[in-house]
Amino acid sequence: MAQLRNLLSKQECLKKLAEEPFKRVTLSFYRYTKLEWPEELRDRLYKDWSGLGVFGRVYLAREGINAQISVPEPRFKAFQSHLEAYEPFRGMVFNIGLEQRESFYKLTLKVKKQIVADGLPEDSYDLSQVGHHLTAEGFNKALEAAGTLVVDMRNFYESRIGRFEGAICPDSNTFKEELRMALDALKGKEDKKLLLYCTGGIRCEKASAYLRHHGFKDVNQLQGGIISYAHAIRQKGLDSRFKGKNYVFDERISEPVTPEVLSTCDQCEEPCDAYTNCNNAACNLLFLQCASCKERFGACCSESCRSVYELPEVERRAYYAKQKKADYGVYVSRIRPQLK
């Protein structure tokens, strides 16, 4: 019987990854489509994709698929052919990563209630009534129109390091919060032209349908998201109205789109757009940290976390166990840095 989940440690996975004699292609794709038996499909995909050496994070639900993956370059065409064999996934459009660095080291494939959690009742929007999709050229042109409003449909830690000029960036922790916050921020502006954007387009599908359901008449979304936009401006020599970095949910953390640095180090306030997860595993805070502070604090968010990280292994493990039992959810969540 085929193994249907990874049993190797992170260290073992990284060792195998380092020994690979080929390059990998990092990409993402999604589709909202009705899947009758996502649990069975999950097992088939895990077995087949493991055989192809695919790594990444994939969510399946009755509403469709959301995938961020890394495919061995020599097996890329085989992967495409395999995906085409599944009728709901034929003709899938791939968003190829802007940077081809190490992104994933194992395959995680889960069945979820939704591929993008929104926390809303089913009648809150109709996914068949999404906004108008704009190319990079169309999005740039629409940005010039008087009265146009552009809305970032990502979380606060994403827009901190990169965003479109003049964008409304709701101060949200999750997409669930984002939808309601965007609706509140746009109240009374139902007749305005709206331009929505996100990383690869998947969140804008729901957001545009949600806003149309609430009476917004001219809702538009960036086709393929920031990733597709960045490819277009490079290939066609367009002016980039997106500045800074694009946050991604893998080991790379971010991809540069333009050289502008829009944020500052959470510890010294010097210009910085490099994210770090605190080395104290019981903290794991995601925060901005410059190279100087990273050296000073040992890639930790504070002296107290550094002192934990530098404990002998036995003591450190005991501390982690105690903290996880106390309130583990607080430590692993992307809480807001308050380090000064």
Image (cartoon, helix red, strand yellow):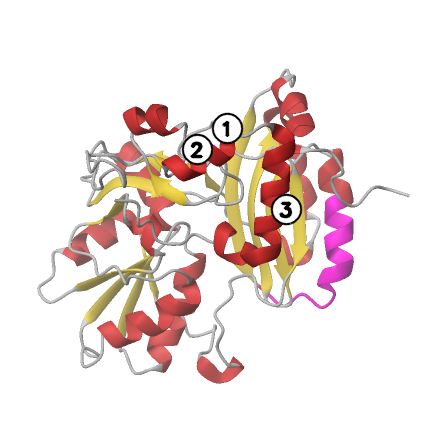
Quickly name the residue at label 2. Answer: 306
- Residue 334's label in the rendered image is none
Of residues 155 and 84, the one nearer the viewer is 155
Q: Are marks 1 and 2 in contact (CB under 8 Å)?
A: yes
Amino acid type indicated by mark 1: Glu
Residue drawn where x is 35% and y is 74% of the image: 180
Which residue is situated farthest in the left direction here?
A: 146
Quickly name the residue at label 1. Answer: 310
Quarter of the rendering occupied by the C terminus: top left
Quarter of the rendering occupied by the N terminus: top right
Gap between marks 3 and 1 measured at Cα: 16 Å
Quickly name the residue at label 3. Answer: 321
Of residues 315 and 113, the one nearer the viewer is 315
Residue drawn where x is 17% and y is 53% of the image: 141
Other residues around mark 1 within 10 Å, as few (<14) / some (14–19) / many (≥20) = few
Residue drawn where x is 76% and y is 38% of the image: 7
Location of residue 202 with respect to 108 vertically, above or below: below
Q: N-terminal of the two: label 3 or label 2? A: 2
Gap between marks 1 and 2 measured at Cα: 6 Å
Location of residue 88 with respect to 267 vertically, above or below: below
Residue 268 in the image, given as x and y percentages of width and height: 22, 35
Of residues 298 and 229, the one nearer the viewer is 298
Is there any visible trace of residue 221 in the rendered image? Answer: yes
Q: Are marks 3 and 1 in contact (CB under 8 Å)?
A: no
Gap between marks 3 and 2 measured at Cα: 17 Å
Q: Which residues are magenta?
A: 33-46
Membership of 120 in magenta stretch: no
Q: N-terminal of the two: label 3 or label 1? A: 1
